[in-house]
Amino acid sequence: MIIFLETLGCSRNQVDSEIMLGKLVAKGHTLTDDPSQARVIIVNTCGFISTASDEAVDVILEMAEFREKGILEKLIVTGCLAQRYKDDKDLISTLPEVDAFLGTGACDYIVDAVENKEIKTLTIFPDPAKRPFQNLSDKRELITQNFAYIKVSEGCNRKCTYCIIPKLRGTQRSRPEDDICREARRLVSKGVQEIILTAENTTDYGQDFKDDTGFEKVLNSLALTLENDPVRIRFLYTHPVTLTRDVILAVKKHKTVCSYYDVPIQHASPKILKKMGRPYTNEDLYGLFKTIREIDPDAALRTTVIVGFPGESEEDFDILTNFIKDIRFDHLGVFIYSDSSDLKSHSLKDHVPSKIAEKRHDMIMAAQAEISLAINENHVDKTLKVLVEENPEPGVFVGRTMFQAPEVDGVTFIYADGLEIGTFVNVRITQCFEYDIAGVIA
């Protein structure tokens, strides 16, 4: 079978897609980048917030059109959207175009779904918490060329009131340390130049183990495993409580680990943090970023926040805005609170009108644009190490520095000829923009 797979959502979803593709290739199936040429289309969905669910449905319907325009025989929907609405009796009737629905714990069943000959709609929803979470490196077909994500754990034990991830992904299960290092070694042998550790809360790694294994231990082990390779290590989605001094010291210790901290704070108002179920205070956050700056002054900081959460007053919003201006994050993402009846936060009082939430979103983005531009101005005339990833036009290459994560941050434009994709080069920065920088070979 010729198969096309569309991945929506986060880096964890991308890993699931790569695992499914690996299993299909191992069974002799062929992959294509052109959905019009596919006999089977798989849409690996996100259903975390309403806009993601809407996008997923739009993509599903778009792909279904290839029954008429192409040679499509089977349309399969996997991932969080399917898992979130698995008990919704209207799911199948609402999307009759879909031949199979697979939940987040059903990656191992993808071959069965593709090869199943039955006419009726197939639904597979095993408990995601019971899915084995190791030895993922043996069957993985990489979607990206120069970087690769490694899941260090799956699921979440946190109880944030706005989040449904524990229901979609199950309780936390951390991978064995040696399994993570083995996968990293395998990926580097395939030519990957950047290993990116990911999870629902990466620094919660090991909390489900019976010993005292923490994230700093696996980070140290991985850095030592790859210390002689031309590769860098990055980690995303830390939790403010478990991003400890030991983790920060481990980052500072190893030259292969990017001084880059992705710390989704969600908010800075004590009242809103409590309503969100986030187990830290405004003072805790100030203390955390002070510690990072003291130990690693050149570190890049990224965060995400939610505006328009139920009960968010102008005072709460001002606290958040002032916090952002005080910390001066290199990168920041803003989400408008997305309500749903299956969230604990749904029952909270004083929901914020959408127009006010949208205005607050725009205000945060405007403030961050000024901060990002000022930070990027400080890079001008400096020489930075850049991973070359694309050559979109003659004389222009695109890459990333250690303080630019793929897909969510800005990029570095390199004005040069003859560079090799997948190599590191030194670039003297000559221009800056709000989110990107540019330069020439040093």
Image (tube, rainbow, N blue to C red):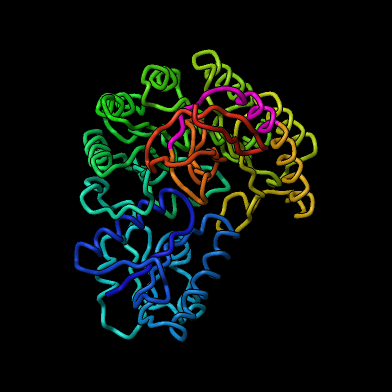
Q: Nearer the viewer, residue 380 or 326?
A: 380
Which part of the image, by quadrant, shows the N terminus?
A: bottom left
Q: Given the current orientation, which residue lies at the most extreme top position? A: 294
Q: Nearer the viewer, residue 184 or 114?
A: 184
Across and down, in percent, residue 381 comes to: 60, 23
User: Is residue 37 shown to the viewer in this render?
Assistant: yes
Q: Is residue 439 above or below residue 17?
A: above
Observer-nearest residue: 374 or 432? 432
Q: Which stretch is magenta?
A: 371-387
Indicate left or right for 16 with 318 as reference: left
> Percent position (x, y) of residue 347?
64, 52
Above or below — where is 226 with respect to 93?
above
Q: Quadrant of residue 290?
A: top right
- Which one is nearer the viewer's eye here, 24 or 119? 24
Please report the residue visible at 66 percent of the width from the left and 27 percent of the height from the top: 377
Drawn side of residue 361 relative to residue 277, left or right: right
Residue in view at x 79 percent, y 34 percent: 315
Q: What number of labels is visible?
A: 0
Where in the figure is residue 88, as x and y percent of width and height? Answer: 48, 71
**Figure check: 221 above or below 95:** above
Q: Position of residue 239 (x, y in %)?
A: 49, 33
**Magenta stretch holds residue 143:** no
Drawn side of residue 17 relative to residue 433, left or right: left
Any part of residue 212 in sight: no
Res 281 quadrant in image: top right
Q: Quadrant of residue 424?
A: top left
66 sits left or right of 267 in the view? left
